[in-house]
Image (cartoon, rainbow, N blue to C red):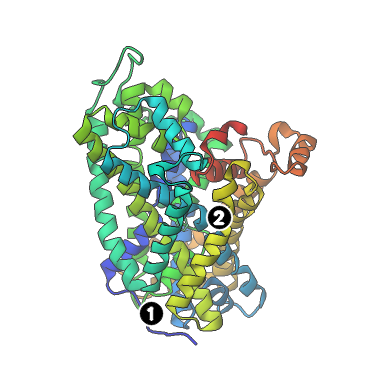
């Protein structure tokens, strides 16, 4: 039923595609906001520890599982997990690895479509001469579908469908198309990022104004980079750090397994998985922290940033600030910023599209074109209600299960499958077959014991605390259809309310609802 021998064209293509998968909107929109909201330098140590103890082990696991499945001709988690155990349950568990991608990609491509239209606005100078409020309102009108941008009503929906269509088209061309986009998009993204980071690093306090006399870009950088050890005891910071690591590395979703299923049987996965993972961290920690926060701090001051840090800054504030650099550099900065977001977004949304296509192929033998079109239709069916009615937030409950709980649960189950059911010795051999580096054997222990225990802790910490420990209030809001109001120190709250509202990024003006 499956074509066994389709594989990545080259090693560099594979690494760029996998890095493109990981490097996404999360690096530039989610990371800086998480860092600021969790105390700046207080965030970075838990974050790095979570990278080492959960991120890397899960990368090893998912790459190994994926390549193992691909060897048997399977390209979707239901079939791949099924091939690793005799128990039929694993096939059903594998469905998580498809469902989550579709649920997330429906939003993700919508945000991608905003970045695309904002590139055009930067080219055409739409924001030239607009005041701060006006730029911010412009965005509100757009997402509320109340403006008629360029004189076209419902433009956001058309742009959304267009961008989804671009994804479908690229997916229909197969791995070759994905590699091509990654080869163009990833280097461009880094160039754009460096242009903006350079601006952020060099602007200092030149733009302090009467309104914001203390503005200084370096305050933003120092805030993010000065480690603070006292926060190490704060579970809330740890949970936020774990959530960010999951999201940014694309683990727990089934998309890495799918990409890895196209790696040749004896081709290295040890070094490749680390290369892709570290590329993501490089882009996240160096570039992700050098743009929005320092630039906003450079104009508006760190206090403003700390009060207003949120996903909306990217679209509501940045275009206004860029204008202050003059028309030409303002346009360059706008194109760089939204272009960077666009490429970060599309290389990730493609990665979320492939699991569905792999499943259609494994299950029904569907070809790429059929797979890609069916993906587009199902993503559209899930995304449209949100686009149309997003201000009512009725997708919250659904997002919570799809984009949050499912991620942690799936990661936990798959690492148990890998380390315990399939067996760590077989798993370790699988990971090391064809390896170009020697992975420290401590990771064998970490994969088997440490990561599963940490995942269980994260899961428990995430689930149990309702806001102010008020169970009846939380249940009441749940019955009213407003979701379960978790305590702000629980991971679920971190991920649902911030992923979905702010980071998955749909509802910036309602974010304070929680
Ligand atoms: N890692 C991506 C980001 O940082 C998001 C993503 C998750 C992409 C899962 C693919 C699969 O934005
Ligand atoms: Na990322």
Query: In screen coordinates, is 461 left or right of 3?
Result: right
Residue 117 appears in the figure:
yes
Which label is found at residue 384?
A: 2
Q: Secondary structure at mark 2?
A: helix
The x and y percentages for residue 265 are 38, 79
Comparing 490 with 101, the one in front is 101
Q: Nearer the viewer, mark 1 or mark 2?
A: 2
Residue 219 appears in the figure:
no
Q: Secondary structure at mark 1?
A: loop
The x and y percentages for residue 81 are 56, 73
The x and y percentages for residue 372 are 45, 71
- Quarter location, residue 169: bottom left
* Among numbered discs 1 and 2, the one appearing first in the sequence: 1
- What residue does disc 1 label? 265
- How crowded pointer 2 is (Cα within 10 Å; few <14, some 14-19, many 20+) is rated as some
Residue that lies at the very extreme toward the bottom in this rendered image: 1
């Amino acid at each position: 039923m499956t074509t066994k021998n389709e594989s990545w064209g080259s090693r560099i293509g594979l690494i760029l595609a996998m890095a493109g998968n990981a490097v996404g909107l999360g690096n530039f929109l989610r990371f800086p906001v998480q860092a600021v909201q969790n105390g700046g330098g207080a965030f970075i140590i838990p974050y790095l520890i979570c990278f080492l103890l959960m991120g890397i082990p899960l990368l090893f696991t998912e790459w190994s599982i994926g390549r193992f499945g691909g060897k048997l001709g399977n390209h979707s988690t239901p079939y791949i997990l099924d091939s690793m155990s005799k128990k039929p349950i694993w096939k059903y568990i594998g469905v998580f690895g498809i469902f989550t991608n579709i649920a997330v990609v429906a939003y993700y491509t919508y945000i991608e479509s905003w970045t695309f239209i904002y590139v055009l606005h930067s080219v055409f100078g739409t924001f030239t001469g607009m005041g701060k409020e006006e730029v911010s309102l412009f965005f509100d009108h757009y997402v509320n579908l109340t403006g008629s941008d360029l004189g076209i009503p419902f433009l956001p929906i058309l742009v959304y469908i267009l961008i989804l269509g671009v994804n479908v088209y690229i997916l229909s061309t197969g791995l070759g198309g994905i590699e091509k986009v990654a080869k163009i998009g990833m280097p461009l993204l880094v160039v754009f990022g460096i242009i903006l980071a350079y601006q952020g690093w060099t602007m200092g306090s030149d733009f302090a104004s009467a309104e914001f006399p203390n503005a200084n870009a370096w305050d933003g950088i120092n805030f993010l980079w000065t480690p603070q050890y006292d926060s190490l005891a704060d579970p809330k910071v740890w949970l936020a750090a774990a959530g960010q690591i999951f999201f940014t590395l694309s683990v727990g979703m089934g998309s890495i397994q799918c990409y890895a299923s196209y790696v040749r049987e004896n081709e290295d996965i040890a070094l490749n998985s680390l290369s892709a993972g570290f590329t993501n961290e490089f882009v996240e920690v160096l570039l992700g922290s050098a743009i929005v926060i320092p630039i906003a701090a450079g104009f508006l001051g760190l206090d403003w940033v700390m009060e207003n840090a949120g996903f909306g800054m990217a679209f509501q504030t940045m275009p206004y600030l860029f204008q202050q650099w003059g028309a030409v550099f303002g346009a360059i900065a706008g194109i760089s910023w939204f272009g960077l977001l666009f490429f970060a977004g599309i290389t990730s949304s493609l990665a979320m599209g492939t699991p569905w296509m792999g499943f259609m192929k494994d299950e029904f033998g569907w070809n790429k074109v059929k797979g890609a079109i069916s993906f587009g239709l199902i993503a559209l069916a899930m995304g449209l209600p949100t686009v149309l009615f997003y201000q009512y937030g009725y997708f919250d409950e659904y997002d919570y299960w799809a984009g949050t709980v499912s991620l942690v649960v799936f990661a936990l189950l798959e690492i148990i499958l890998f380390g315990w059911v399939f067996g760590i010795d077989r798993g370790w051999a699988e990971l090391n077959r064809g390896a170009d580096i020697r992975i420290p054997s401590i990771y064998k222990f970490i994969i088997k014991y440490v990561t599963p225990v940490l995942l269980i802790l994260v899961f428990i910490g995430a689930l149990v605390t309702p806001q102010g420990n008020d169970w009846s209030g939380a249940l009441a809001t749940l019955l009213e259809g407003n979701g379960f109001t978790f305590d702000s120190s629980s991971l679920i709250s971190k991920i649902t309310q911030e992923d979905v509202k702010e980071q998955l990024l749909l509802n910036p003006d309602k974010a304070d609802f929680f």
